[in-house]
Structure formats: C-alpha cells, structure tokens
Image (cartoon, rainbow, N blue to C red):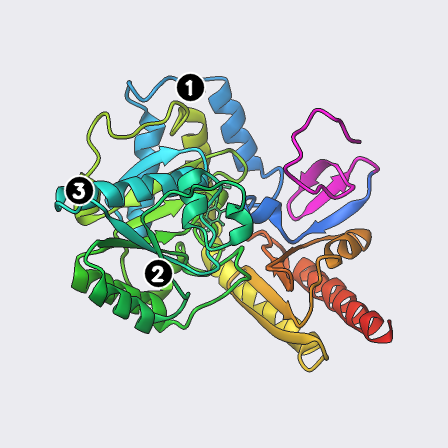
Amino acid sequence: MSTPHLMNTYNRLPVTFAKGQGAILWDTEGKAYLDAITGVAVCGLGHAQPDIAHAICEQAQTLIHTSNIYGIAWQEKLADRLCGISGMEKVFFCNSGAEANEAAIKLARLYAHRKGIAEPRIVVMEASFHGRTLATLSATGNRKVQAGFEPLVGGFVRVPYGDLETLRQVGSHDRNIVAVLVEPVQGEGGVRVPPLSYLAGVREICTAHGWLMMVDEVQTGIGRTGQWFGFQHAGILPDVMSLAKGLGNGVPIGACLAAGAAAELFAPGNHGSTFGGNPLVCRVAHTVLEVIERDGLVARAAKLGTRIREGLVARLEGVRGVVEVRGLGLMIGVQLDRPCGELVKQALARGLLINVTADSVIRLLPALIMSDEQADQLVDILSGLVTDFLAAEVKA
Ligand SMILES: *Cc1c(COP(=O)(O)O)cnc(C)c1O
C-alpha cells in the first residue's frame, strides 16, 4: 500500500478508500467509516452526490476546457450566482485556496501602487493559515509552515487574532499598511471563533484607514458555518474574499471575489490561470450552489452544528482534560489540555474519520447533508473515544 515514488509530503494514515456514499466511506477491505472531515471541508454535499456526478458526466461529454482567451458561459453563470449570494461584484477563478489568496495579495499590492505606496504591507494574524505557496506561507501565522523556505515574501505585519486594539495601534503608526487578511473562524489554527463583534470591528478600522478588508473564506465559505459566508454572521461586506474547498465538492476550483475599488484593479495582463474557471469545474460549482439552495443546506449546517456541539457538551463538559467544545455551524473543535494527535488513529479503528489540529484540538468538518442519526453516532463514538483517551492517560 505504499510506493517509493511519491514525495514525502504527508504522514499518511494506513487506510485507502475505495468508494463513498453521502457521509460514509468504505476502505479497500470493505470496512465502513463515518466521515466527519470531508476531505478537509471539501465534500460538503457528501460523497458520490448524484447531481454532482451528473453535472461532471454531462459536461465531460460536452466540453471540459477551452481557454480564458474565449468566452466561457458556465464561468459567467457561476460568477453571477456567487456575486448574488455574497454581495461581491467581480470574480477571478483559479484552482485552489492558496491561489485565491495569491490573487487577493496581488490585488492589495496593485491597490497600494495606485495610491503611490511603494512598500505596501498587509496585516495578517497569529495562528492563521492561508496556503503553501511562497506568498501565502509567508502570510500564514505558523512557523512550521514557513521553516526551511526562507527568505519569506515580505510585506506582512502580524497581530494577534481577535485583538482589535493591537490592529488599531498598528494602523495609527504604519502608513504603509493597505489591507488586512483575516479568517472569519481560524480552521487550521485550532477552530478559533472570535467574538461576534470582531469582524465588524476589523471592517470599521479598514474603512477608517482606506484599507482593503480581505477575508479568507477558503474553509468557512459555502455554507459551512451556517451562513453562505462567515462574514455574513457579522452583517458586513468585505472588499475581497477568497474561496476554494467546498466550492467544487471535490473538483479543484478556487475563486477570488472583490467589491468596490478592489473589483476594478485587475486589467488584462495582470493575472491569469490556464485551468482557472474551465467549463467543467464551473458547472460543477454552479451545481453545488444550486443543491445547497434547493435543499436548504445553509440552515441545515447551522442546525446540525448546534446538535453536534450540544451533544458533545452534554457528554464531555466537566470531563477532566476537556477544556472547551466550540465552533460555528459545521466547524467544530474540541480543545483538550494535552496533545491528542493519536486520537486520529484510534478514531479510525472505531470507524470514524476526524482530524487533530494545533496539537490539542479535535477538529470536525462534517458534510452539510449528514443525517441527525449520523450526527448522534458521531457524538457517541467521539465522546467515548475522548473519555477513554483521557482515562488511559491518567492511569499511565
Ligand atoms: C485550506 C486553506 C487554504 C489553502 O487552500 P489550498 O486549496 O490547499 O491551497 C487557505 N486558507 C484557508 C483558511 C484554508 O483552510
């Protein structure tokens, strides 16, 4: 089950999946698993979703790829729909989250140079994650992601996440700041949910200084948090937003959206992508949005998230070693007081797929289509697992 011909970029678990259906995956031995991670927030509609399968098949038999030097009808339809649900005005399509953030960073720099700022800086957050290209790993607030790849791309200033006071102070000293890049909820950083007033505060500071407010919704977007986009919980509109993960339900697509002045910055020759926004991926993403709307899955994500969080609180609150159960919609974290990476393997043995991030945070990113019964089963297996893990540690 392993080959010497893959670069050593992942510590892979000893399992290979052969097929999926909804929230269930089966491995090559035929064992079933409840999927509470969905390929890291990608397959929000679940596996082998029939509308998605149909869209892929029909489009593959019609037209997969032409080029952005021609008109692409599905790209225009998808852009219209994304702007309709977000309030943004223009879209650039790419193939991943990192690329979407690269486009955002390039927009901020163009914006600066138009204003005559030659050495622009973008404010980024501690414990953030924005991708693994050189600019996005430089923006990321995690030394493990950066180490070995210096020199980093310059032009980033880092402040603590959730801290408006420091952001204000930095703004009053540094005339070269042109933008803020922030996740509505930090995913890789440990499912950190800021106070509700935080994004509104960032918006206010950005507006006061004429900075672009850029939200990285690669993980939080497309219904996951119980709104179409995380920023909508705050009742504000950013200037720039990046999307990827859940947008394609597994086909690779990213998008950078902009409103106002930021929407008018790019001109032909400034940016591009060979694959970006081809007919296949755009039709699939358009279908993703249609299915979410048709089946009321944004509201479903909010309800299901509350059900899972309340279930976990009921079973785990007060258990020694459990610090907090938190989250927003279907981004759910269980913070323990100790490293718990080994829980991923133990969960696998019990037929459950989870993730651990920031060393001591169990992260759940279930599909928006998970049933109540599956959600209760998830709570059951996970709380049993955590209780056993903490009890064994005390004994040892
Ligand atoms: C996953 C993620 C990215 C990177 O996306 P890729 O598609 O892996 O490049 C960027 N930002 C956030 C918030 C993410 O969760």
* 10 Å crowding of disc 2: few (<14), some (14-19), many (20+): some
State which tag comes first along the sequence, 2 or 1: 1
The answer to whether the beta carbon of the residue marked 3 is less than 8 Å from any atom of ligand 1 is no
Q: Is residue 331 above or below residue 244?
A: below
Q: Is residue 321 above or below residue 78?
A: below
Dot 2: element? helix
Marks 2 and 1 close (CB-CB < 8 Å):
no
Q: Is residue 222 above or below residue 174?
A: above
Find disc 2 in the rendering and name its residue: 232
Q: Would residue 256 be found to the left or right of residue 20 on screen?
A: left
Q: Position of residue 307 (x, y in %)?
A: 59, 68
Q: Position of residue 370 (x, y in %)?
A: 62, 54
Task: Give the CA separation, mark 3 to mark 1.
Answer: 34 Å
Residue occupying the point 62% across, 51% down: 37
From which residue to which does the magenta span run? 1-29
Asked whether 282 falls inside the magenta stretch, the response is: no
Label placed on residue 113 = 3
Quarter of the C terminus within the rendering:
bottom right
State which tag comes first along the sequence, 3 or 1: 1
Amino acid type indicated by mark 1: His
Q: Position of residue 214 (x, y in %)?
A: 31, 52
Q: Would residue 3 be found to the left or right of residue 229 on screen?
A: right
Residue with the most extreme front position: 151
Amino acid type indicated by mark 2: Gln
State which tag comes first along the sequence, 2 or 3: 3
Quarter of the N terminus within the rendering:
top right
Label placed on residue 65 = 1
Q: Nearer the viewer, mark 2 or mark 3?
A: 3
Asked whether 24 falls inside the magenta stretch, the response is: yes
* 10 Å crowding of disc 3: few (<14), some (14-19), many (20+): some
